[in-house]
Structures are given as C-alpha cells and as structure tokens.
Image (tube, helix red, strand yellow):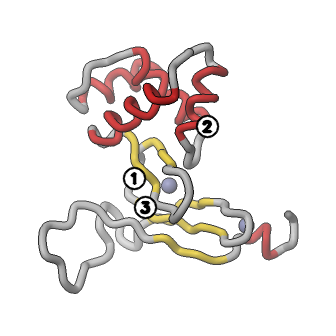
Amino acid sequence: MSDSVTGRIRNAGLRVTRGRVAAIETLQALGGHRTVDEIARGLTGRGVKVARATVFNVLGDLATAGLVVIADAGPGPTRYEVATYDHHHFVCTICGSITDVPCAENGGQCIEPAVVDGTVSNVQVIYRGVCSSCEAGDT
Ligand SMILES: [Zn+2]
Ligand SMILES: [Zn+2]
C-alpha cells in the first residue's frame, strides 16, 4: 500500500516525505471525509506525532497537488478526502452524515455553468436532505 502512496506522491511532482505518506495512509484508513483534527488524531494513533499546523500544511500541499480533495459539505470544519473520482456530496440535515454522489456523467464536470466569467476547473454540488437511517429513525 505504501509503495503506491509514495508513487502517487512522486507522480504528483511532490517530494516524498514521511508526513505526506502518513497523511494519505491515515486518510485512506479512516475513509470518508475527515477534518484536520480527525486526521491529526489518526496520525497520533499510528504513532506519527505531528503538530496540528503541520497536518494542516501537509493536507494543503496534498490538495494543491490533487492527491487530496477538500470535500465541500457546507458550513463547519474543512473536510478532506483522498482524491479518487469526481463526485458530489449528499449531506443529511439531521445527523450531518456526508455521502458521496457520483457525477451524472462519468469523468469530471457534469454541470455546465450558464454564465461564467473565467475558466471552471471543478464543480462540487451539495445535495441536502435526510439520510435513510434518519428517515428510519435509527438515530
Ligand atoms: Zn442522517
Ligand atoms: Zn466525497
């Protein structure tokens, strides 16, 4: 696993550092959409001691390189996820759960903007509603 992580970092044009590898591995292991605090806690759990500010910087570098994506799920702390495929998010207004929603068309931007002054490189839609477990009254 870590071989492919180091390969991904190298392919993205970044220097392979322990912090970057650990951040991706941790985010991958945690799965889903995670805050800096959750990732920092995950790193500590894996025996990697780094300051929160460092984690924040590492995630910023990884996001700029396209290895990590900032998941737009509305207000609240910034959430990161491992970049896999282009998708949107369904946010439950009751429990706050975030679920991936694939793009309508495979591969990239599935919504054409009517008017844009500039060049669009990414689009993320937030679908809001009530998730199935909240609908079932599980929580
Ligand atoms: Zn819910
Ligand atoms: Zn996602």
Residue at the image position 36 percent from the left and 21 percent from the top: 6
Q: Is mark 1 within 8 Å of ligand 2?
A: no
Name above or below for residue 35 compared with residue 115. above
Name above or below for residue 129 compared with residue 81. below
Q: Is mark 3 within 8 Å of ligand 2?
A: yes
Write down the residue under mark 1. 85
Left or right: residue 32 versus residue 102 is right
Gap between marks 2 and 3, in whole Å?
22 Å
Quarter of the view holding residue 130: bottom right
Does label 1 or label 2 sit earlier along the sequence? 2
Q: Of the residues shown, which amino acid type is indicated by label 3?
A: His
Residue 93 seen:
yes
Quarter of the view holding residue 66: top left
Residue 24 seen:
no
Mark 3 neighbour class, 10 Å CA radius: few under 14, some 14 to 19, many 20 or more: many
Q: Residue furthest left?
A: 118
Which label sits in the foreground, 1 or 2?
2
Residue at the image position 55 percent from the left and 43 percent from the top: 35
Residue at the image position 61 percent from the left and 13 percent from the top: 47
Residue 57 point in image, percent of width and height = 38, 31
Write down the residue under mark 2. 38
Residue 52 point in image, percent of width and height = 51, 29
Q: Nearer the viewer, residue 3 or 69?
A: 69
Write down the residue under mark 3. 87
Left or right: residue 92 versus residue 103 is right
Q: Nearer the viewer, residue 91 or 100?
A: 91
Q: Of the residues shown, which amino acid type is indicated by label 1?
A: Tyr
Contact, mark 3 vs mark 1 (Cβ under 8 Å): yes
Residue at the image position 66 percent from the left and 60 percent from the top: 97
